[in-house]
């Protein structure tokens, strides 16, 4: 089914073990699971896709946590929820056993970034109920490094903490890495980054967009790596330090990449939606789960020959962020890449709308120090993406600065029609 160094019989045995356990008690999954055992990983395709919409509807019908439970409710010890920045909140539960699995998977992510004993890792997150904050914190301890939670602090206090604790690694969103570097520069506090060797980003495409990564690496004078995961699935992607992008942790996840419209496997070289089955998560399982993450299907190895399917550009976009303009798939990350290559830009906002001529149009409002860069950005977007875009220059600081997951696309077309 995909490139992996873990022998297929081992993964098949674990998959069958998971399915047998789940089908015994989980009333959400029972009707989805066929005759067991499966004889090959390809037979996983007999199981229909699951999605966030299905889990949300199930929780609405059976409040508060739905029926995707393989154990009695009282055996779950970890309660989390999705951020709600993209539609309804999904409540997520884990048993102690599943939480230990999260911890081990996060440790694999961190080891791939070279983190271990002697490292001091600052987590520049709000530490609300979003699972990634807590799983990252646990993973840091699992690899023998020291973790510092920077919840409840403003950026100035965080800069002070980085310096005081001689932090070696910072975990945050790419948007926040850019923002914190701006705050440090404005306040003459770049010394706060002196001991930082690397920034590990997730939550948005940024760290796998070369121009964004380069901007973070220059501003911090540190290496920038990406990883990926979902609350309702697990931390499935670990960073590729050599080639950029992320690898799927295939010892623990079975990955498929599908054409989102047909559900058929995407071809090598195409983009598609990532579908994941988590082998180690039993209590509230993710089986053939449509992540909504748009990724490249690239069947070859990464430049360093690491194990695990390689997603060269990480997560390109959320499928609900990808917009179709005049018949073309347009990724906000591609627009961002081209703009950052061309000029020193701040925050930006992409708006799709329909002209009176019934043509789809794209407007990009972007914070620019020099309004003279508008023409160069327009030219490069047309040459590199084939996209005619209206650029509206704004003074720096006009758009709301994102410190959490950034939402930078507004599609007015559905409202107009
Ligand atoms: Zn690699």
Image: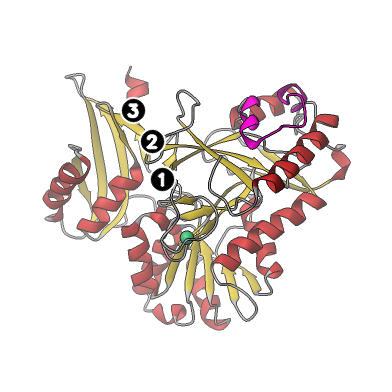
Disc on the earlier residue, 2 or 3: 2
Residue 138, given in percent of the width and then of the height, sits at 70, 63
Q: In the rendering, which numbered label is found on residue 335?
A: none
Disc on the earlier residue, 1 or 3: 1
Badge 2 marks a residue whose secondary structure is loop
Sort mark 2 into few (<14), some (14-19) or many (20+) by Cα contacts within 10 Å.
some
Residue 273 visible in the snapshot = yes
Q: Are marks 1 and 2 in contact (CB under 8 Å)?
A: yes
- Residue ID for mark 2: 322
Sort mark 1 into few (<14), some (14-19) or many (20+) by Cα contacts within 10 Å.
many
Residue drawn 57% across the image and 51% down it = 4
Q: Which quarter shows the C terminus?
A: top left
Residue 35, given in percent of the width and then of the height, sits at 76, 24
**Vertical placement of 217 versus 192: above or below?**
above
Badge 3 marks a residue whose secondary structure is loop
Residue 42 shown in magenta: yes
Quarter occupied by residue 2: top right
408 vs 33, left or right, is left
Residue 174, given in percent of the width and then of the height, sits at 44, 58
Residue drawn 38% across the image and 50% down it = 400
Q: In the rendering, which numbered label is found on residue 316?
A: 1
The span from disc 1 to disc 2 (Cα, nearest Å) is 9 Å
Disc on the earlier residue, 1 or 2: 1
Question: The magenta stretch spans which residues?
Answer: 29-46
């Amino acid at each position: 089914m995909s490139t992996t160094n873990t022998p297929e019989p081992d993964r098949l045995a674990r998959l069958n073990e998971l399915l047998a356990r789940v089908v015994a008690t989980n009333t959400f999954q029972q009707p989805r699971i066929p005759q067991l055992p499966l004889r090959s990983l390809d037979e996983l395709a007999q199981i229909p896709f699951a999605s966030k919409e299905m889990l949300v509807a199930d929780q609405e019908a059976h409040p508060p946590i739905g029926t995707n439970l393989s154990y009695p409710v009282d055996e779950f010890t970890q309660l989390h929820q999705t951020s709600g920045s993209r539609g309804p909140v999904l409540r997520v539960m884990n048993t102690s056993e599943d939480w230990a699995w999260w911890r081990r998977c996060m440790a694999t992510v961190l080891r791939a970034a070279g983190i271990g004993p002697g490292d001091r890792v600052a987590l520049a997150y709000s530490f609300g109920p979003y699972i990634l904050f807590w799983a990252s914190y646990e993973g840091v301890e699992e690899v023998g490094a020291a973790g510092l939670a920077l919840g409840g602090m403003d950026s100035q206090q965080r800069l002070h903490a980085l310096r005081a604790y001689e932090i070696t690694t910072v975990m945050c969103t790419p948007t926040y890495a850019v923002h914190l570097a701006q705050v440090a520069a404005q306040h003459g506090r770049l010394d706060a980054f002196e001991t930082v060797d690397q920034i590990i980003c997730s939550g948005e495409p940024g760290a796998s967009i070369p121009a964004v990564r380069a901007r973070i690496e220059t501003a911090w004078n540190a290496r920038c790596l990406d990883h990926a995961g979902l609350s309702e699935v697990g931390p499935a992607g670990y960073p590729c330090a050599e080639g950029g992008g992320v690898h799927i942790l295939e010892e623990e996840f079975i990955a498929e990449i599908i054409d989102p419209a047909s559900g058929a496997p995407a071809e090598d070289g195409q983009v598609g939606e990532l579908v994941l089955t988590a082998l180690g998560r039993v209590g509230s399982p993710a089986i053939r789960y449509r992540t909504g993450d748009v990724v490249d299907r690239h069947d070859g190895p990464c430049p360093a020959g690491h194990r695990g399917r390689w997603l060269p550009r990480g997560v390109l976009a959320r499928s609900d962020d990808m917009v179709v303009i005049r018949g073309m798939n347009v990724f906000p990350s591609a627009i961002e890449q081209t703009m950052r290559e061309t000029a020193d830009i701040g925050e930006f906002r992409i708006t799709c709308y329909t002209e009176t001529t019934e043509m789809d149009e794209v407007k990009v409002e972007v914070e620019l120090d020099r309004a003279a860069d508008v023409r160069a950005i327009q030219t490069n977007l047309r040459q590199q993406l084939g996209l005619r875009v209206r650029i509206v220059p704004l003074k720096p600081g006009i758009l709301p600065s994102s410190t959490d997951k950034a939402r930078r696309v507004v599609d007015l077309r559905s409202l107009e029609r």
